Amino acid sequence: MPNQWTAKDWLWRVSLPGTGHGSPAIWGERVFVASADEAAGKRFVICLDALSGKTLWQREFPLKPYRHHGENSPATATPAVDDFGVYVAWIDPEKYTLAALDHDGKDRWSVNLGAFKSQHMNGCSPIVVGQNVIMAIDQDVADASFVIAVDRKTGQTKWRTPRRSDNAASSTPCVYELAGQPPQIILTNRSEGILALDADTGRRLWTLPDALPFRSVASPVAGAGIVLGNCGEGNSNRVLSAAIPSTKPDGRAELAWQIKTVTAPYVPTPLIVGSRVFLLTDVGQVSCIELASGKLLWQQKIPNVTAGFYASPVCVNGRLICITKKGEVIVLATGDKLEVLGRTPLDEGTFATPAIAGGRVYFRTLTKLACIGK
């Protein structure tokens, strides 16, 4: 991918029905994306050809309007996909739905996860781990939050683990793997800090309590024996905590290091690249720190930024791709200082993190999906 590009460099760009903030999901030569039209009362799941952008199929589902944050959307969750199907999640006022379609858009199963209450509404996406689809339901109602795993082929509940929460989180779980052990599901919220569950059984393995005193929006990430979780609130309250997972009977993780300044992001997820972590804050400050120690290596604000950041940074061929809320793609080097390699406008705002597959990068803006690559 070039550092910047013009119209001739696009493989394709297409309009989507409605709007949305969820990222595209790719399987083989198919791209899946969700969208919504609140005025028309419709949700959409769309499948496009990854090489041409041609719509292969489109499903419509009814949408009942509900109150949500002005920068949220009924199509915020990113679909999950595997060789069996595509898994989507959405909210209506009375229920939280988790559903599966096959790759041709036909219904496989649908699960009602119950009522959901949150000040800002949902942001979490489903993930596929082994034979299960896993979803975290973190809401404002005490004793009503839980994590659930359903069989990816039938939708039947495999396990359901209650979760403490008094402040809804929008963070999507990540997977942490140790040699010879079942995968761990890593979750973050204000009430329980950083929590790990056994992916096969839902059993609690370890926690780092009091690690996240504010709302969790960004997703946790893990690498080289360190698990990162971050949180925020308002314009200045930010915390990033690094946990060393526990194997002790008491299940209490060790705090490796912590950042309690605006160096820590609120919405964008931290990015681990080798032995370093790149932090992109909501206002465009980039920090490079050592993963093992939390030592700050360098820090600088991206120059001439006219909008903040919600999309998380991704790394492609040793370069960071960062996208502002107004849709400017900024490519940075991953060296020992801030180096802007290129800037390209997408001509429309976006909150969605791009997806990477097959040497191509897929950008989702508010109403469009675009692809650059070969």
Image: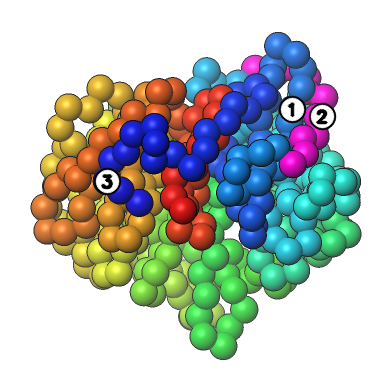
Question: Which of the numbered marks, if any, corresponds to residue 3?
Answer: 3
The residue under label 1 is which amino acid type? Arg
Determine which quarter of the picture holds residue 359. bottom left
Residue occupying image coordinates x 72% and y 58%? 133
Q: Give the mark toward the camera: 3 or 2.
A: 3
Q: Is residue 214 visible?
A: no
Give the alpha-carbon distance from disc 1 to disc 2, as whole Å: 5 Å
Q: Secondary structure at mark 1?
A: strand
Magenta run includes residue 48 = no
Residue that numbered label 2 is attached to: 61
First in sequence: mark 3 vs mark 1? 3
Give the alpha-carbon distance from disc 3 to disc 1, as whole Å: 35 Å
Residue that numbered label 1 is attached to: 43
Residue farthest along the top direction in this orientation: 39
Q: Counting other residues with Cα less than 10 Å from the Cα at mark 1, is it few (<14), some (14-19), or many (20 or more)?
A: many
- The residue lying toward the viewer, choosing from 68 and 331, is 331
Q: Counting other residues with Cα less than 10 Å from the Cα at mark 3, is it few (<14), some (14-19), or many (20 or more)?
A: some
Magenta run includes residue 59 = yes
Residue occupying image coordinates x 52% and y 38%? 12
Say whether marks 3 and 2 touch (CB < 8 Å).
Answer: no
Q: Give the mark toward the camera: 3 or 1.
A: 3
Q: Range of the magenta residues?
A: 56-67
Say whether marks 1 and 2 touch (CB < 8 Å).
Answer: yes
Residue occupying image coordinates x 26% and y 70%? 275
Position of residue 273 in the picture relative to residue 70 (left or right)? left
Tell me if residue 299 comes above or below residue 266 in the rendering: below
Determine which quarter of the picture holds residue 301. top left
